[in-house]
Amino acid sequence: MFFILSKILLFLISPVNWILCCVVVAFFTKKLLLRKRLLITACVFFILFSNFWLFSLCMKAWQPKAVPITYNRTYTAAIVLCGMTASDKNGDSFFSSNADRFLQTCRLYHTGVIQKIFISGGDGSLWQNKPKEADFLRKEFVAQHIPDSVLIVEHNSRNTYESAVEAKRYLDSLHIAPPYVLVTSAEHMRRSVATFKKCGLDVVAHPANFRVVNSNLSFADYIVPNVGVLSDWKSFLKEVVGMATYKITGKG
């Protein structure tokens, strides 16, 4: 039930859906004052949520600071969370924009920082009809000259909480000592660390795939609407609302 409710909530927190709802209701309503207010609201939402400067301000406050990460010790394992692939109608999988999680994990192994890799994640879709992501990643890690013997695969979890529960069960049963390096997207790191620690796992954050870095903004970033930012807000709000939901339900 929690999994289904989270998917419904994801639909409700999308600024694009807010704008569409305002426009659709305005189109069908016969009340002129209500129509005017709805269209104004839609315009305000569009201006706010398509502004890159505002988005970058919020994202930089939320995600870990984008700085080079160095290690002075080795770790028994890295836990890499799935959510970096897409699949087509034929069931073939491909890397998506979050693939830096994969790259960072390869880097950690090949530089000797980690000894094993725990891959966590199955099918996060509502209908559970997509290929298991962890199985695809296992093949890709092997293709990058990482021995299959160091890979531990869990492909049943559907969200962050389930990944933490499965990681605790697997790593404890294999007697792999903590702490572990946790690899996931920067915007997802705050919720992930809280969830994994709540499940009793000692983790060290290794954020990847930063949405925003401390770069110089152009004049256009302050005033010109950027349609692409609308979808980025959905991802950001998902993390903020998800963090609050996990705290309320005792999962994070």
Image (spheres, rainbow, N blue to C red):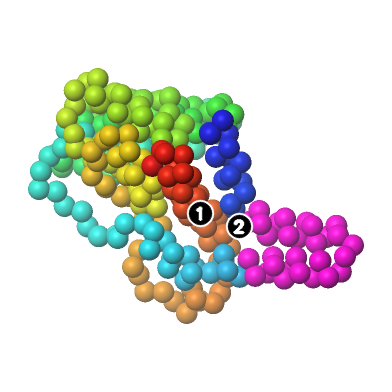
Residue assigned mark 2 = 15
In which image quadrant can residue 103 be found? top left
Which residue is most to the right?
Answer: 30
The answer to which of marks 2 and 1 sits earlier in the sequence is 2
Dot 1 amino acid type: Leu
Residue 156: x, y in percent?
A: 43, 24
Residue 240: x, y in percent?
A: 46, 53
Q: Residue 183 in magenta?
A: no
Q: Where is the N terminus found, in terms of image quarters?
A: top right
Dot 2 amino acid type: Pro
In which image quadrant can residue 107 be found? top left
Q: Nearer the viewer, residue 157 or 104?
A: 157
Q: Nearer the viewer, residue 72 or 12?
A: 12
Span of residues in magenta: 16-45
Q: Are marks 2 and 1 in contact (CB under 8 Å)?
A: yes
Mark 1 residue element: helix
Distance between the Cα atoms at labels 2 and 1?
9 Å
Drawn side of residue 165 relative to residue 75, left or right: right
Mark 2 residue element: helix
Residue 238: x, y in percent?
A: 50, 49
Residue assigned mark 1 = 237
Q: Residue at x 47, y 71 (%)?
A: 53
